[in-house]
Image: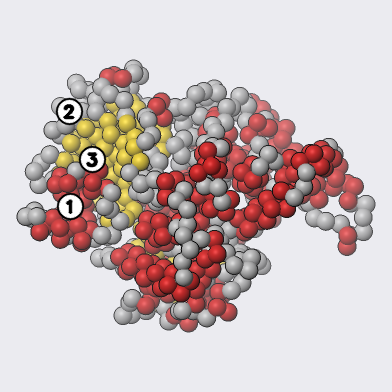
Amino acid sequence: MCGICGFVEPSGRRAPASLVRAMADALAHRGPDGDGVWTDEEAGVAFGHRRLAIVDLSPLGRQPMESADGRLVLTFNGEIYNYRDLRAELEAGGIRLRGQSDTEVLVEACAAWGVGPTVRRLIGIFAFALWDKAARRLTLVRDQLGVKPLYWGRTGSGAGAGEGVMFASELKALRVHPGWSPELDRGALASYLRFSYVPAPHTIYRGVAKLPAGSMLTWEPGTEPRTERYWDMRAIARVPPRERDPASAIDALEALLGDAVGRQMVADVPLGAFLSGGIDSSTVAALMQARSGRPVRTFSIGFDAAGYDEAVHAKAVAGHLGTDHAELYVGRDHARDVIPRLPDLFDEPFADSSQIPTYLVSEMTRRHVTVALSGDGGDELFAGYHRYLWADAARRRLDRLPRSLRGVAAAALSGPSESAWDRGFGLLPRAFRPDRAGDRLHKLAALLAASGPDEVYRGLLSHWDPAEIVRGADEPRGILWDGSVAGEIPDFLRRMQFLDTVTYLPDDILAKVDRASMAVGLEARVPLLDHRVVEFAAGLPASLKVRDGQGKWLLRQVLYRHVPRELVERPKMGFSVPLGDWLRGPLRDWAEDLLDGRRLDEDVVLDPGPVRRRWAEHLSGTHDHGDRLWGVLMFQAWRRRWLGPGSDRAGEADPAPRPHRAAVG
């Protein structure tokens, strides 16, 4: 993995090497093994690179890299897992390669076959920029599932020919460029407070976008950027599944996963795997060990808080597989020490609290290896989330109730406030008193009032109603509000999986893993998200994913061939921390400072009323608003770090930022 950055300015505007080097230096954590810049000042082009050397550690793997014919220049972040196959084809066609890196294979393949045809043949995780000197064309590409990040925006104050384009792996590198002044996008903030992440293509800043997963952007000076999808998850998901023989499906999945794992075990540096002891990571570790002549290195962390420790399960799986296992037990002080670093690590507000243990396990793993395989993606591909089953069951029950009756019940339940319901139930004996009664009854009311299953599911994903908390914001309505998706993917379970795969997966899960691992110079690979595995899983019927009220049926059958089911069959715990207790205890002063009502009011971005009310309820113990409050806290901490308290860059309600003008095919 690496960090990439660069810009192309209109003709006549200089592209100094010192500027692109400063941008690259902001990404030094992503590439501690070296750096490089390439500039063509006359053309106004500058590319930067920070290197984490994984394949071909020699100088022949350095970037930015020019093609042998001198026409193309590439700066590349990621890994191409089928580069050896592509290399053999290039050499069979008479092209001689100088080194052994996948970078050289990529740039020479683009020169020989064209960018589009090459990208459609890649198996890997990647984000790259390519400059064609002859055509004066910039191309930006992001991998199929969005494993690797790529941000882009316009530079300059004018429109059209007066503007340039800049790009980088992280937003902090773009902030270095003098042609852009960061301003808060309130619409993106509204989306963030709903989902706990900023959904693509938006970013927290006006005028800068995320390149969507599976997309390729092309731009020539004087024109508008054009974006097209070279791999489309929506097109794949709308193909109806076909029935398969279970035994042959198990064989096919194991063979495909085995190939993906084997390709991702290629590295010229030490390699291991994250192991939580759950289905996904245990499957990856088992397939790695089956392909290794020596014990595979595996890593897990544990917490000293009851209900949050999976290390004992990981140790049992590692013992059965015979891996070389290391574990770190983290005290609460160590975990809390990470919190002040989060605004720097994540660049924009990000409020999935599992970011803390993800960073800690990455930090520990990096002391031993440079590459680690993870099990991310299994829940989305094989229907592992509890919410899939819950929402589907709720939909079936609600369909049996007349809409008029549902409306009356919803009005009755939502009429009294949450606190009023809590006071009422508080009169009951403790043995009959439900926990968080008001919160649960209001959620039930929202469920009854929902216009359809998609609104039910959207409600499950929402932490805040942005209209309640963000002043003057116009929340963007993305694919989760797109009614045409239901027509294309009528099966509700498949639709939920699809929506998570194109939103929650790249913008939360993969962003979390990328920033946490790259902060310590660790490359994280995700074999379950080999796009061939994704396509295979998308074609499976529900009967091979969900059985007896449990998801991941097919993936479990593959794992049971390597690990006894009693070692991995247990309730899903997740990768979490005792956030609610911390906010009432050791983090209370820190949180109180960030949630101060007077400061919130002066900042004129968030309405302090709902925030302070939830904070008071949380402190009293009547409600657990930990996740909701974490979203506000992470925004406030981010804002202080990157915009400053009381900043005048708060932004007004505004239309979509300029990069979003690009047409998406």
Determine crowd level at label 2: few under 14, some 14-19, many 20+ residues with C-alpha closer than 10 A. some
Q: Which residue is mark 1?
A: 104
Question: Is 93 left, or right, of 178 in this rendering?
Answer: left
* Image marks 3 and 2: residues in contact by CB distance under 8 Å: no
User: Image quadrant of residue 571?
Assistant: bottom right
Q: Earlier in the sequence, mark 3 or mark 2?
A: 2
**Is residue 519 visible in this depiction of the protein?**
no
> Nearer the N terminus, badge 3 or badge 1?
1
Query: Would you name the residue on which mark 2 appears?
Result: 43
Residue tagged by mark 3? 130
Measured from the top left, where is residue 480 in percent x and y? 55, 40
Q: Amino acid at mark 2?
A: Ala
Image quadrant holding the N terminus, namely bottom left
Measure how far apart labels 1 and 2 are at the Cα level.
Answer: 24 Å
Q: Secondary structure at mark 2?
A: loop
Pinpoint residue 378: horizontal percent, then vertical percent: 49, 61
Name which of mark 1 and mark 2 comes first in the sequence.
2
Q: Viewer-proximal residue, 147 or 206?
A: 147
Q: CA distance from mark 3 to mark 2?
A: 14 Å
Q: Nearer the viewer, mark 1 or mark 2?
A: 1
Q: Residue at x 26, y 37 (%)?
A: 139
Residue 278 percent location from the top left of the image: 53, 69
Q: Using the rendered view, name the quadrant where residue 311 is placed.
A: bottom right
From this view, report whether residue 570 is shown above or below residue 395. below
C-alpha span from label 3 to label 1: 13 Å
Which numbered disc, 3 or 2, marks the residue closer to the eye?
A: 3
Left-right relation of 61 to 144: left
Q: Residues within 10 Å of mark 3 (few under 14, many from 20)?
A: many
Q: Nearer the viewer, residue 225 or 53?
A: 225
Instruction: Name which residue lies at 20% across and 28% down.
Output: 44
Disc 3 element: strand
**Circle 1: residue type:** Glu
